[in-house]
Amino acid sequence: MFESLQSGLSTALRSLSGKGKLSEANMREGLKSVQQALLEADVSFSVVKDFMARITEQAIGERVLSSLNPTQQVVGIVHQELIDLMGPVDHALHLRGDAPVLMLCGLQGSGKTTTCGKLARRLKNAGQTPLMVAADLQRPAAIRQLHVLGEQLGIEVYSEEGAQDPVKVCQRAVQKARNLNANVVLLDTAGRLHVDEDLMKELARIDQRVSPQQVLLVVDGMTGQDAVQSAKSFNEALELDGVIMTKLDGDARGGAALSVKAVTGVPIKYVGTGEQLEALEEFHPDRMAGRILGMGDVVSLVEQAREKFDEEEMAEDEARLREGQFTLDDFKKWITRTKKLGPLNKIMGMIPGMGGMNDMLDGMEAEQDMKRLMGIIDSMTPQERRNPTKTIDQSRRRRIAAGAGVQPHEVNELVKQFDGMAGMMKEMAGMGMRDRLRKVQQISQGPLASGGLLSKTKQGTGKRLSSTERAKMRKEREKALRRKKREQRRKK
């Protein structure tokens, strides 16, 4: 999510570093690069123009130019303006009365029916009893899909075989909701391949006759400015209460998410981050701005972990860490748990300072790399896993590498990574949640203080890799991966 925008902004802001005290001339040059990064991410031109005017007014001011750390000040200004651009957001659905109605609308292919199921799941988990209504009479497949989702979720679905008028279907569904013990009604309305007059008239009739408490537009984040224009058209016809943006786990450049609120005045309430029914998250502008600038989103990561991790097991691990115990077995367990949270590149983007790792994952098979890591750990003896630094010498390293089918230097790299993580985990174990977040914030601000957002470093040197060096690293990894695949095919 937002990889191209992250990369563009990090390059632009990094250009301001290393200049000592910033002048108005090099400040304007750096801000011009910020503007270019936003435009390339498909942010609306009018939005970029206003956004840059606000940033420039603050960044060229005497306060920033004369500050001790002007680069960090500029990052702070960009961060706050991104938050203001996308927010504020009220996530409450404000459900009142008996069987309040939520109306979902959107273009065909935006993921509206799946989102209806995701939203129904959220409501059910919150203690509500939703009823999903198949009001998309244009596509029989959508009706069947909604029934399949209803069976998976254990949620009632209302539909009428052979019905011709979606308005009457919605009206009768609302009337029968009480008989079906439902206290929230979700209308999955029809879509089109593009905005047209017939669609808007149909949706306007449903809006007038059924009077939904919330009208939510589902838009495809992959469509960029088309998503913004469709949101504008729907809002003019229906007066939207919020937007749900889907497919942000794909190759979304991020422009739509940054533009929707500014162009329509309607906030993004939720974002779809995967095809799974649980992959619907509340949209938090401050957290999203942190991800875009490579600061991570630890709060969302903690929330997801609480949902998917066993609390008793986590408490036992916490107690071990307090006693200063952290082994490669713990490390392996941590990685196994982490995989439950989703794809590696998504998790990396939520960890402060690690967003830039996604560049290094390009062209690599992350799951294969994880298996190699697990193979190395499994090839060790229990004693080696408990204390790898002191136990693993050169001969043991060769033995472990042979057992895992890797090169000895890869074993050495794992041990170095483990040492760094073990120190941090032990340090954070004795902290309360507030202190942990402060520690994480310090880690995330390290690159910012030196002006190196998302900086890639040569291992052990602290020097940033150039784009040529990063490309060379990717090619080397790709070659190694191809060699391994050829060897596997030969063995078969």
Image (tube, rainbow, N blue to C red):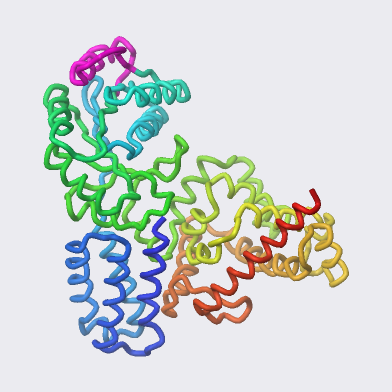
For residue 485, side relative to residue 433 (left or right): right
Residue 1 sits in which quadrant?
A: bottom left
Residue 361 in percent (x, y) is at: 55, 62
Q: Is residue 295 above or below residue 66?
A: above
x%, y% of residue 27? 28, 83
**Foreground residue, 232 or 481?**
481
Q: Is residue 66 left or right of residue 315?
A: left
**Number of marks in the image?**
0
**Residues rendered magenta in the picture:** 158-184
Q: Is residue 319 magenta?
A: no
Could you tell me which residue is drawn at 39 percent across and 75 percent down?
11
Q: Which residue is located at x 20 percent, y 63 percent?
A: 45
Q: How far from the left and from the top, in percent, is residue 359?
A: 50, 65
> Residue at left 31%, top 12%?
161
> Closer to the camera, 278 or 192?
192
Q: Is residue 160 magenta?
A: yes
Residue 283's spot in the image, x, y percent? 34, 48
Q: Which of these two is toward me, 465 or 397?
A: 465
Q: Give the answer, above or below, for where 355 lies relative to 206.
A: below
Question: In the figure, 46 relative to 460: above or below?
Answer: above
Q: Residue furthest top?
A: 179
Picture residue at 27% right of the left edge, 89% below the top = 23
